[in-house]
Amino acid sequence: MKRATLDVTTSNFALERSIERPWFRSFITGLIIFNAVILGILTYGHSLPAGLASTLGLMDQAITYVFALEILLKLVVYRFQFFRVGWNWFDFIVVGISLIPGGEAFSVLRALRVLRVLRLLHVVPVMKRITEALLKALPGMGAIVAVLALVTYVAAVMATNMFGNTETEEVRQLFGDLPSSALSLFQVMTMDGWRFEVMQKVIDDGHPMAWVFFLIFIFVASFAILNLFIALVVDSLAAEQKAVLEEGLEELEEEFEEERGEADDARHEILSILKQLQQDVAELKAAAGGQAPTGDG
């Protein structure tokens, strides 16, 4: 029984070493990129030759089975530990969706198979660090979104009261009620055609000083608050990079300590050998000195 358990443990260890090797990760990364290309080509649909479309479909299905086999191997190795990592949940769900059989009822879910391309976000180390930095910045982003929503709400109420009571249909569509005002101000905040499509219409409707309101809103919402997102993401990336550097320094220190320990062990071993040689030489001298010379007296 113990021998069987030992064999299973050894087998799992060998399998774990195999799936964690760089060549295996590079193979999976290459398959993800190749599968992304195939899915992109398949979007051309009926314009593709029937034989090519069929071949690409079979290749896509084969790649899906390879991904499923990868998940299965990880489940065999890590068992329930597999589900303790969020990225593993993502892989499990995306690959599971890809295995759903075709048909109109599952066409929407089948379209989600392109999400397998997003596996690159944690397969490629650089992308993984950036993604984790963005995820760590989400709580701070939530606070900024709340501030932005508050500013937009206040500005929308003001704009509705100032510009909504008008006979001009175009201006009424822009600021006739609170939702319309919020949507128009969102367009102003993104600075997409805000001058002629929004502000100029309000000015022509009899509000010559409306530009003051819009410029203040753009300054507060776009230049100030939205730039906080950039600052937060940059700070999160800097913190992530600092953590990576510290981790690298810790690894170097550990390697240095190990090498120094090995050097100390080697030095002690050499010293012990030298001491033993000194003792042997001293014993040989003592033995040679203790022998009296013999001859005819």
Image: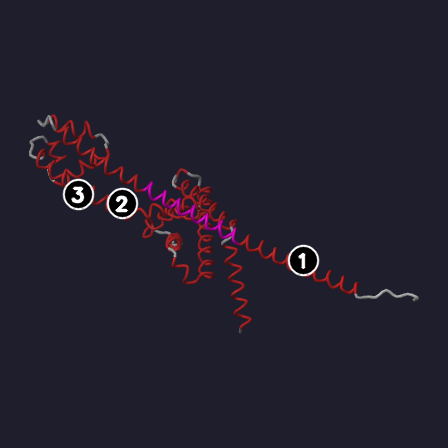
> Sequence order check: which comes first, mark 3 or mark 2?
2
Q: Nearer the viewer, mark 3 or mark 1?
A: 1
Question: Going by the image, does 213 lie left or right of 43?
Answer: left
Q: Whole-Å distance between the Cαs marked 1 and 2?
A: 66 Å
Q: Residue 128: image x %, image y %?
A: 40, 47
How dense is the environment of label 3, judged by Cα within 10 Å: few (below 14), some, or many (20 and up)?
few
Q: CA distance from mark 3 to mark 2?
A: 14 Å
Q: Residue at x 23, y 44 (%)?
A: 145
Mark 1 burial class by Cα count in 10 Å: few <14, some 14-19, many 20+:
few
Up/down of 271 relative to 173, above or below: below
Query: Reading the chain from its start, which is encountered first: label 1 or label 2?
Result: 2
Q: Of the numbered discs in the image, which one, if any, rests on residue 286?
A: none
* Residue 99 coordinates in the image, percent (x, y): 40, 54
The span picked out in magenta is: 233-257
Q: Which is nearer the eye, 278 or 106?
A: 278
Residue found at the very far front of the displayed protein: 297
Instruction: Name the residue type under label 2.
Output: Met
Where residue 54 sits in the image (x, y, percent)? Answer: 45, 45
Residue highlighted by disc 1: 274
Q: Which residue is mark 2?
A: 141
Dot 1 falls on a residue whose secondary structure is helix
The quadrant in which the C terminus is found is: bottom right
Q: Residues within 10 Å of mark 2 (few under 14, many from 20)?
A: some
The residue lying at 9 percent from left, 35 percent from top is 164
Q: Which residue is mark 3?
A: 150
Q: Nearer the viewer, mark 1 or mark 2?
A: 1
* Quadrant hosting residue 174: top left
Judging depth in this view, the residue of 216 and 120 nearest the camera is: 216
Query: Is 232 included in the stretch rendered in magenta?
Result: no
Disc 3, SS? helix
Residue furthest bottom in the image: 1
Residue drawn at x 11%, y 34% is 172
